[in-house]
Image: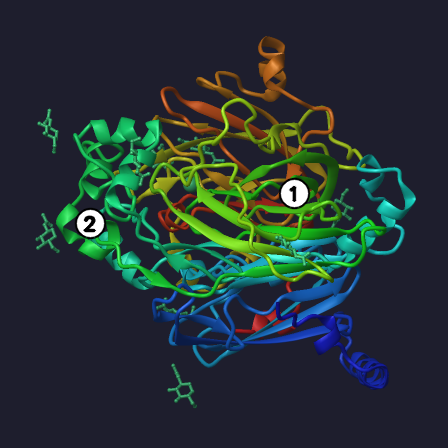
C-alpha cells in the first residue's frame, strides 16, 4: 500500500526553523494572521481521467494520479495544511470526514456553507489542527463527486500517554506489546461501492426518470475489485426475503445485476409518485457487463511461533449507497475503536459498515495456519446483491506456498452459512466509549425532525423541506454571514454555545430505508431509538413512559448514526450533542442519492459566539 504520510511530506527540521522564522516576521508585519505554521503539509492535484479500478474504464477523479487518493498520516496535535489544486473541468470541495475542525469551521469543505466552490484551475488551502486521534477519511463534498472516486483515508496517531482499551483484550505483557505495535501502524481497508457511470450521468438519468439509481457495478477494497455478473440461478437462489417482498408486488425477479428492477422501485416506494422507467438506459439496472481488476492483498509474515503477532486494520466505509457486511473468512476481529475513538473492545466475526463508518480492528495472527483468507464485503442493502473480495495472506517464513482456501461465514447475500453456530455480528447499539465520556442528563433544547419524501422518490427531506444545493452559487457562504437568531426555513437549527441539543429523527412514512445521518463539527451520542411514532415533546417526557428505549449511561459516540429501518411502521432515533464548536455545520444523510436529493439541514452552533472568518479565507474563492 502506498502511504503519502508525514514521513514523505514532512518538512526537514532546518526548513521548519526557516519557516518559523519567516512566519514570525510575517506575523509581526501582519497582525491579522493568527494561523500557526503547519507541520504537516499536503498538496492534492485533482484531475478528471480515465481509470479502471474494476477493469472497466471510465472517467473519474484522481488525486495526485491515484485512486483512492493518498493516505494522509499525521500526529495528534499537528497543524495540518492541505492544498487542493482543482484541475477538474468542474467545481469541487474537500471535506475531512469526522474531523471536528475545532475553531476552524471555514476548513470543513461544504460549498455554500463553509466556503465558496473551488472552481476549475483554482486552488484552496484547508488549514486545521488535528485535535483528535484515530481513523478518519476525506472525500469530495460537491454533489455526487464521492461516487467519482474523490476520497482517501486519514490516520491521526494518538498523542503519547493516551489511555488505551487493550488491557481489556489481554493482560499478557508480551501480547500487549504486540497489540500496541500493531495498533501504531494499522493497515487501511477502504470499502467502496463503484459505478460505471459518472455522477453527472447518474444525475441526468435520475432527474429524467425520477427514480433513485440504486444499482452499482462493484464493491472495491482499497480501490480494487471486479464487476462480477452472477449466473441467473445464483441470483434467484440468493434473493433474500426482504427483496422477495418487493419483487412479489410485480411478480418479478432481481435483474442480471442483482438489482430490484426499476419498475418495482417505481411501483412500490414510488407508488403514486411520478416516474419514467423508460428514461433509464439498460446498463444502469438490467444489463450486467463483467470486468475484472486487481485484488487487494494484505500480507502478514509470521516471524516465529514464540512471538505473539497481531495486525490492526482500519475499515473505512467510503460507500455511496450500499451497507457493507465486512468479514474475513474464519477470523475473529477485536473491534477496539469506532469512528476514530477507542471503545470497550468486542470480539466479533463481522461488522455491518454503513456510509462513512470507521472500525479499527485487531486480528491475532499467531495461530493462523499459513494461507489465504478471503476478505469479504457483502451488500446487505435491499436494493442489490453485490459483493467484493480481497485477500489476507498469512505466510510463515519457512513455507510461503499457500494452497488452502478459506471457508466463508456468509453466503454472498449476507445470510450466515451455519445456522447452528452463526457468526457473531458487531452490535453497534451496545458500543461503549473507552474511557467513559460524560453526557448531560438532559438537553437544553430539542428539535424534532420529520424525514420524508417530497413529491418523488428522488426528493428526500430531513424535515419536510428539500435542501437546495444551489446555495453554493448564491453568494457568500452561510458561515461568512451573520447567523440567523432563530430557525425560520425548516432547514436551519440554531443553538447557543455550551448547550446540549437533542435531535429526534422520525420517519414520517414506511417503508423507509435506514438513513446514516452524519453531523459535521463534532460527534453525537445515540441516546435512544424505537418503533412507532415519537409522541413526546422531549426525551425527558418519553423516558417517563418508555425508559427501556433509552440509554444515557455512556452511550455510543460517533459522527454518524443510522436511523432504524422502518419496514412495517414508522420509527425514530434520538441523538444528543454538546454545542461547543461554533460554526455552520451540515447535518445530512450520507447516502449520496439521499444527500443529493435534499436530505440535509444546517446546524448553526453557538450563534452567540459566532466565529470571525479569517481574512485569508474571506478572500479565497
Ligand atoms: C485551466 O488552465 C489550463 C492551462 O492554462 C487551460 O488550458 C484550461 O482551459 C483552463 N481551464 C479552465 C476551466 O479555465
Ligand atoms: C441453486 O439452488 C439449487 C437448488 O437448491 C441448486 O441445485 C443449485 O446448484 C443452486 N445454484 C447455484 C448457482 O447456487
Ligand atoms: C409470474 O411470472 C411467471 C413467470 O414469468 C408466470 O409463469 C406466472 O404466470 C406469473 N404469475 C402471475 C400471477 O402473473
Ligand atoms: C420518458 O423517457 C423517455 C426516454 O427518455 C422519453 O422519450 C419520454 O418522453 C418520457 N416520458 C415522459 C412522460 O416524460
Ligand atoms: C506448506 O504449507 C502447506 C499448507 O499451507 C502444506 O500443505 C505443505 O505441506 C507445507 N510444506 C512444507 C514443506 O511444510
Ligand atoms: C461553480 O462555482 C461558481 C462559484 O460559486 C458558481 O458561480 C458556478 O455557478 C458554479 N458552477 C456550477 C456548474 O455549479
Ligand atoms: C416549512 O414546512 C411547512 C410544513 O411542511 C410548510 O408549510 C412551509 O412552507 C415550510 N416553510 C418553508 C420556508 O419552506
Ligand atoms: C420542521 O418543520 C416544521 C414544519 O413541518 C417546522 O414547524 C419546524 O420549525 C421545523 N424544524 C426546524 C428545526 O426547522
Ligand atoms: C463554547 O463552549 C465551549 C464549551 O463550554 C467552550 O470550551 C468554548 O470556549 C466556547 N467557545 C467560545 C467561542 O466561546
Ligand atoms: Cu438517507
Residue 4 in which image quadrant: bottom right
Taking 482 as reference, is 497 above or below it? above
Q: In the image, which disc is placed on residue 209? A: 2
Residue sitting at x 47%, y 54%: 192
Residue sitting at x 63%, y 49%: 521
Q: Is residue 146 left or right of residue 107?
A: left
Between 224 and 453, the one nearer to me in the picture: 224
Within 10 Å of disc 1 (Cα), the crowding (few <14, some 14-19, many 20+) is many
Between 286 and 500, the one nearer to me in the picture: 286
Within 10 Å of disc 2 (Cα), the crowding (few <14, some 14-19, many 20+) is many
Verify CB contact (< 8 Å) between mark 2 and mark 1: no
- Residue under label 1, please give it: 523
Q: Is residue 249 left or right of residue 156?
A: left
Residue 541: x and y, percent?
60, 14
Whether residue 158 is visible to the viewer of this picture, yes or no, is: no
The reply to whether the residue tagged 2 has its Cβ within 8 angstroms of ligand 4 is yes
Q: Secondary structure at mark 2?
A: helix
Between 284 and 105, the one nearer to me in the picture: 284
Amino acid at each position: 500500500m502506498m502511504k503519502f504520510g508525514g514521513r514523505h511530506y514532512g518538512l526537514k527540521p532546518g526548513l521548519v526553523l526557516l519557516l518559523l522564522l519567516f512566519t514570525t516576521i510575517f506575523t509581526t508585519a501582519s497582525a491579522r494572521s493568527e494561523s500557526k505554521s503547519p507541520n504537516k503539509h499536503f498538496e492534492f492535484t485533482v484531475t478528471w481521467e480515465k481509470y479502471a479500478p474494476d477493469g472497466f474504464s471510465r472517467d473519474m477523479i484522481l488525486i495526485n494520479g491515484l485512486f483512492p487518493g493518498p493516505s494522509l498520516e499525521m500526529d495528534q496535535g499537528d497543524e495540518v495544511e492541505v492544498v487542493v489544486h482543482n484541475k477538474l473541468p468542474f467545481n469541487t470541495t474537500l471535506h475531512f470526514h469526522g474531523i471536528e475542525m475545532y475553531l476552524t469551521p471555514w476548513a470543513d469543505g461544504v460549498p455554500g456553507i463553509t466556503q465558496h466552490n473551488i472552481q476549475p484551475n483554482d486552488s484552496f488551502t484547508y488549514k486545521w489542527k488535528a485535535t483528535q486521534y484515530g481513523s478518519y477519511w476525506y472525500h469530495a463534498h460537491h454533489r455526487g463527486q464521492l461516487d467519482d472516486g474523490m476520497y482517501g483515508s486519514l490516520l491521526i496517531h494518538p498523542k503519547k500517554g493516551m489511555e488505551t482499551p487493550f488491557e481489556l483484550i489481554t493482560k499478557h505483557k508480551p501480547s500487549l506489546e504486540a497489540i500496541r505495535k500493531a495498533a501504531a501502524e494499522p493497515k487501511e481497508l477502504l470499502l467502496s461501492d463503484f459505478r460505471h457511470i459518472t455522477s453527472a450521468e447518474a444525475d441526468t438519468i435520475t432527474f429524467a426518470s425520477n427514480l433513485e439509481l440504486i444499482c452499482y457495478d462493484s464493491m472495491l477494497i482499497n480501490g480494487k475489485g471486479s464487476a462480477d455478473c452472477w449466473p441467473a440461478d445464483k441470483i434467484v437462489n440468493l434473493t433474500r426475503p426482504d427483496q422477495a417482498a418487493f419483487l412479489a408486488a410485480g411478480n418479478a425477479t432481481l435483474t442480471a445485476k442483482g438489482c430490484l428492477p426499476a419498475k418495482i422501485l417505481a411501483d412500490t416506494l414510488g407508488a403514486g409518485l411520478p416516474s419514467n422507467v423508460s428514461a433509464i438506459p439498460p446498463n444502469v439496472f438490467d444489463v450486467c457487463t463483467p470486468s475484472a481488476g486487481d485484488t487487494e492483498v494484505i500480507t502478514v509474515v509470521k516471524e516465529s511461533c514464540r512471538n505473539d503477532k497481531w495486525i490492526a486494520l482500519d475499515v473505512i466505509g467510503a460507500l455511496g449507497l450500499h451497507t457493507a457486511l465486512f468479514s474475513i473468512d474464519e477470523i475473529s476481529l477485536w473491534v477496539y475503536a469506532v469512528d476514530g475513538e477507542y471503545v470497550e473492545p468486542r470480539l466479533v466475526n463481522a461488522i455491518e459498515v454503513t456510509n462513512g463508518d470507521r472500525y479499527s480492528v485487531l486480528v491475532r495472527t499467531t495461530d493462523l495456519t499459513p494461507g489465504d483468507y478471503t476478505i469479504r464485503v457483502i451488500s446487505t442493502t435491499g436494493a442489490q446483491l453485490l459483493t467484493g473480495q480481497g485477500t489476507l495472506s498469512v505466510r510463515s517464513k519457512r513455507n510461503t506456498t499457500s494452497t488452502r482456501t478459506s471457508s466463508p461465514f456468509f453466503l454472498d447475500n449476507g445470510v450466515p452459512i451455519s445456522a447452528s453456530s452463526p457468526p457473531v455480528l458487531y452490535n453497534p447499539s451496545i458500543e461503549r466509549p473507552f474511557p467513559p465520556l460524560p453526557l448531560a442528563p438532559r438537553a437544553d433544547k430539542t428539535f424534532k425532525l420529520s424525514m420524508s419524501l417530497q413529491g418523488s422518490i428522488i426528493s428526500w427531506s430531513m424535515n419536510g423541506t428539500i435542501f437546495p444545493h444551489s446555495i453554493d452559487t448564491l453568494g457568500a457562504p452561510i458561515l461568512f454571514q451573520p447567523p440567523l437568531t432563530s430557525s425560520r426555513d425548516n432547514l436551519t437549527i440554531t443553538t447557543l454555545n455550551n448547550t446540549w441539543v437533542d435531535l429526534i429523527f422520525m420517519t414520517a412514512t414506511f417503508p423507509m430505508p435506514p438513513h446514516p445521518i452524519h453531523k459535521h463539527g463534532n460527534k453525537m451520542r445515540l441516546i435512544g431509538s424505537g418503533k412507532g411514532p415519537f409522541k413526546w415533546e422531549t426525551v425527558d417526557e418519553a423516558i417517563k413512559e418508555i425508559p427501556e428505549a433509552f440509554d444515557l449511561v455512556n452511550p455510543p459516540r460517533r459522527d454518524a448514526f443510522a436511523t432504524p429501518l422502518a419496514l412495517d411502521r414508522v420509527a425514530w432515533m434520538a441523538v444528543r450533542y454538546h454545542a461547543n464548536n461554533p460554526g455552520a455545520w451540515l447535518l445530512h444523510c450520507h447516502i449520496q442519492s439521499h444527500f443529493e436529493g435534499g436530505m440535509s439541514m444546517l446546524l448553526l452552533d453557538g450563534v452567540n459566539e459566532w466565529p470571525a472568518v479569517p481574512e485569508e479565507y474571506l478572500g479565497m474563492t
